[in-house]
Amino acid sequence: MKTLYTLVFVLSITVGAFGQGSKLNKADKKYDKYSYIDAIEIYEKVAEKGYKSVELFQKLGNAYYFNSELDKASKWYGELFALNQETDSEYYFRYAQALKAVGNYEKSNQYMELFAQKTNDSRAKLFQENKNYLTNIDAVSGKYTIDKTDVNSEFYDYGPTFFGKQIVFTSSRSEGNQYSKIHAWTKQNFTDLFVASIDNDGRLGSVENFSKTVNTKFNESSPIFTKDGKTMYFTRNNYNDGKKRKSDDKVIMEKIYKAELVNGEWTNVKELPFSSDNYKTAHPALSTDEKTLYFASDMPGSFGNSDLYKVSIDSNGNFGLPENLGTTINTEGRETFPFIDADNNLFFASDGHPGLGGLDIFEAKVNNNSFEKPVNIGKPLNSQLDDFGYVTNKDGLGFFSSNRDGGIGFDDIYTFRICTHTLSGLITDIDTKEILPNSKVILYDDKMNKISETIASEKGLYSFKIDCNKKYLVRVSKEEYETIEKSFEPISINEESKLDFELKRKIFPIEVGTDLAKVLNISIIYFDLDKWNIRKDAAEDLEKIIAVMNQYPSMTIDIRSHTDSRQSHKYNEQLSDRRAKSTLEFMVKNGINRSRLTAKGYGETQLVNNCSDDVPCSETEHQKNRRSEFIVIKM
């Protein structure tokens, strides 16, 4: 009986193992054909029976991961690593990404550390260089305000783009879809392009199929239009003119196509010359001058699963050779869905640069025809799941796509506004109230990182465009004045705020014999011809002298007025004396005790050069003699 029981037990194990192997073979075939939903159903039934293997958990995790269900992928990658068996380094990265989707950043960082120990690819290096990435993302968050749109369905809705006063987007919805052809990968319809109007408040209207001549029984997505609305670039499976083509390994790749609007119909659909049957090209974007096309591809020479490229377009519509945007932008991960804004800055989605989870949206500012290091644009546009397809117009209205929690379908389209704020102000002298042009004004963030710098205008005005919901510090400096700083608290609405500055003139090392006119850069107190009344511009200069005397209450000044030699000696002496005394009276009237002032005109008796009577001199040389002096005679 014991022998018989053992034999039955062994046979049952053998039969069970054979049955599981048969199911796994069936699932593997589904998996290899990218039918991930069908493969998942079989794999999970096998796993529920207690079967465990590295390959099973890898493929289960991958099937969810490649279908952008990262939260579910985290479960099976967790089972994979619980086996404590050797696995490829890429799974450490995928598990780290999947852990972010469930909010477990601490464990995600631990697996990124392990990933960095096993490889030296750019994703590992970027993590090692940016371990405070969550803090940095929080610091840049709050620039955008987002809202749901009314165009979303229970299916995939993504990839919006502006087309006049409409948006054109991608959807796998049933209603309005030109064909009822189900995609084995998604179990939904193949995607078509749809269109919706935009009202004056940025709200979207009813949805219609975009074009029966462009939409086919295969996938169309991510269009971009030229400014005149007559040319469209878009993504489609490798299918045109009723013919489909496959790669060498029997896969229908994505390609970028061009269509022209003729008599109200989109026609002349042609694939772009750098597309191929054997690699993907997708998600086109145009530069502001429409001379450069950006796109995503895994063509030979790519660093990762999907890189960003650019290609030139000449005046005849011919394309140059594709150029990889390089390692500043591209990683061994996915870089996709490029967009160029009105300032030629690049926005794109990536899972290779440090982010909140899945695909995050990044901005790379243009500088001297190249792109700077990408910066995560922060919350709320970015989330723990996939965020991509960022587009905006010159009015600050934008749209993006996300599969975040709280949506209606698998991917949804959201709208956003860029919340920007104008901070401006006037810079004056605190004592004289004189406008101070050409002051240097520097804008810092709350971590004292320099954001921008400007020079105040001739009217003493400065202005900065700043992000909402952020704290800033503004520093103002000017020669001969004390530097001053003021903080600006966060504000959450689009408006203009004023932040004025009053600078205090520096107290210079002054001693008996000092000429305050030289210290304060006053060359002459100006009077009208043959007059001695104080002009407005002369009064502004005298306010500077008064301010210094107020800083030194015991200071006594001798006011000395000089002329050039181009009138009679007596005339010049009398005129200069009247002007000196007029200056004294102005200062007394403005608060300086008479006992602290003396005044005398010296005419042409103290020339500073040889421009005496009958000596030919230039106007510049004569100007040096027409001067005012304010000599300190007591401190």
Image (cartoon, rainbow, N blue to C red):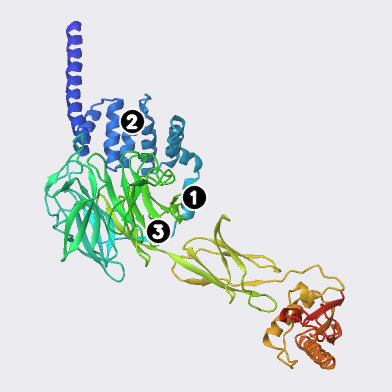
Q: Can you identify the residue that label 1 sits on?
A: 136
> How crowded is the residue under tag 1: few (<14 C-alpha within 10 Å), some, or many (20+)?
some
* Residue in the foreground of this view, choosing between 71 and 328: 328
Give the percent coordinates (x, y) of residue 173.
18, 53
Specify whether 333 is left or right of 490. Answer: left
Between discs 2 and 1, the one toward the N terminus: 2
Count of numbered badges drawn on the protein: 3
Q: Quadrant of residue 444?
A: bottom right
Label 2's element?
helix
Q: Residues within 10 Å of mark 2 (few under 14, many from 20)?
A: some
Which residue is under mark 3? 344
How far apart marks 3 and 1 lie (CA) works out to 24 Å
Residue 57 in picture, x, y percent from top left: 29, 30
**Residue matched to label 2:** 79
Q: Earlier in the sequence, mark 3 or mark 2?
A: 2
* Residue at image coords 33%, 30%: 79
Q: Is residue 560 above or below residue 379?
A: below
User: Callout 3, which amino acid?
Assistant: Asn
Tell me which residue sits at (46%, 63%) in the image.
468
- Which residue is depicted at the point 16% across and 65% down? 264
Residue 513 figure quarter:
bottom right
Q: SS class of the residue under badge 3?
A: loop
The amino acid at mark 2 is Glu
Real-space Cα distance between discs 3 and 2?
Answer: 45 Å
Q: Position of residue 346 (x, y in %)?
A: 39, 54
